[in-house]
Amino acid sequence: MSFRGFLPRERFDTLFSILHKIGAQCIGPTVKEGAITYAHLSSSAQFPHKVTDQQEPGSYRLTPTTDARWFAWANGPQALKPLVFAPEEILWRSERNATGTIAFTTDAAQMPLTAVIGVRACDLAALALQDQHFLHPQGQDASYASRRRQLILIAVNCTHPSASCFCHATGDGPEVDQDYDLLLDELDHGFAVRCSGATGEQIVQQLSLEPLQPSQLNEIDNANRHAAEQQTRHLPATDLEQVLNTLQESGRWQDIAERCLSCGNCTSVCPSCFCHSQHDVPAADGITSTHVRQWDSCFTQGHSYIHGLVIRNETRFRYRQWLTHKFAGWIRQYGRSGCVGCGRCITWCPVGIDVTEELQGLTEEYNNA
Ligand code: SF4
Ligand code: SF4
């Protein structure tokens, strides 16, 4: 989509006013508990100010910066996932009546119209993956679908990838090219604005944008190119599906298990992971019960419990499952890998296990075999 104009920084809060006027709550990045996370916001004053991030395997730190831009940082731990796929929710309720018949009622999620400001390319790609799963034509998830319809996505191109990022390697970033309503590029004094679809057009019409200068367009081009060049992590240029499916008995899985705590952090922060468990919570009245869905992880024992047996009873089998599903199984299921290169599993792994390094090691083992 082509640029529609320039929104000066001092008029950014007009965007909040327009979003509130159309009935949307606003969620955006802010500094909370030492990290940049999404929260309900009412003005740009709550965006991160003069702060940037430093990420490494197993390490995340906010540091002061003289850069006055509001989006001079890479994604924090939180993706769009919790907004559409709730960490815990009731799917249905059951009630036994006097004749012993059980009646079921579903609890379809209700979320107000919600504008998310500051979404990055990797998270839009992950949302597209979650759409494939939860909006599958053969079984749409009602709660996910209901929340997804309420999202207005205001993306901001990422110009400060972290040392953990590799979205250029998966082809999902750092430049946004899909599924946004508004797309912003941050410049010193404001934002270049693009839009897509009817909602985006409706917002842009009310923003009273100023013309963009050719020098600003050059600056945006350079910033987007530089963001891709800054990324130092890569994926092996090989058929990872073949490598992973061939090396299921590799000794490397045990090497990883010596370090891996089976904590499941990587799957919690991963924007595309969708594993969950379901259980019933009977009330003390003996009549009613709720059926609850919670996020689960392939690193928990319960996730592979089948008929009295934990199938993946050792950490090496669980890490193998995670990596093989993410980079091989997804290709058969959804036509592409389940990784969008956000780097969160690298930063937020307490022992700094790095998927790109493990995939490189497995590829070398495969090539040497
Ligand atoms: S596997 Fe890691 S890098 Fe890839 S999408 Fe998930 S968290 Fe991000
Ligand atoms: S790879 Fe890291 S984050 Fe994932 S389960 Fe193992 S220790 Fe936890």
Image: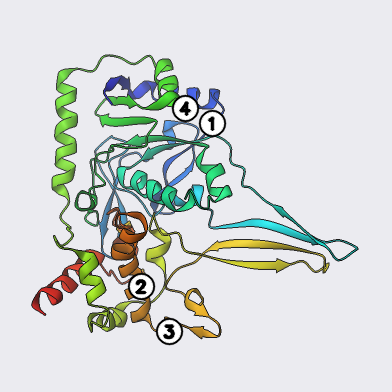
Q: Secondary structure at mark 3?
A: loop
Could you tell me which secondary element the residue under label 2 belongs to?
Answer: helix
Residue 27 in view, yes or no:
yes
Residue at mark 2: 321
Across and down, in percent, residue 273 comes to: 41, 59
Mark 3 vs 1: CB contact within 8 A: no
Q: Amino acid at mark 3?
A: Asn
Residue 150 x, y percent position in the rendering: 53, 37
Q: Residues within 10 Å of mark 2 (few under 14, many from 20)?
A: some
Please state the horizontal and vertical placement of residue 293, each as a whole percent of the image. 58, 61
Q: Disc 2 vs disc 4: which is toward the camera?
A: 2
Are the residues at dot 4 and dot 1 in contact (C-beta closer than 8 Å)? no
Q: Is residue 241 above or below residue 365?
A: above
Of marks 1 and 2, the one in the foreground: 2
Mark 4 or mark 1, earlier in chain:
4
Which residue has dot 4 on it? Answer: 16
Identify the residue under disc 1.
24
Q: Earlier in the sequence, mark 2 or mark 3?
A: 3
Q: CA distance from mark 3 to mark 1?
A: 46 Å
Instruction: Indicate the amino acid at tag 4.
Output: Phe
For ligand 1, tell me if the residue under mark 4 lies within 8 Å.
no
Q: What's the residue type where badge 1 is placed?
A: Ala
- Circle 4 packing at 10 Å, graded few (<14), some (14-19), many (20+), is some
Which label was assigned to residue 313? 3
Frontmost of labels 3 and 4 is 3
Ligand 2 resides in the quarter of the picture at: bottom left
Q: Secondary structure at mark 4?
A: helix
Label 4 near label 2: C-beta < 8 Å?
no
User: Horizontal placement of 262 versus 158: left or right?
Assistant: right
Number of numbered markers: 4
User: In the image shown, does 267 or 333 lie closer to the viewer?
Assistant: 333
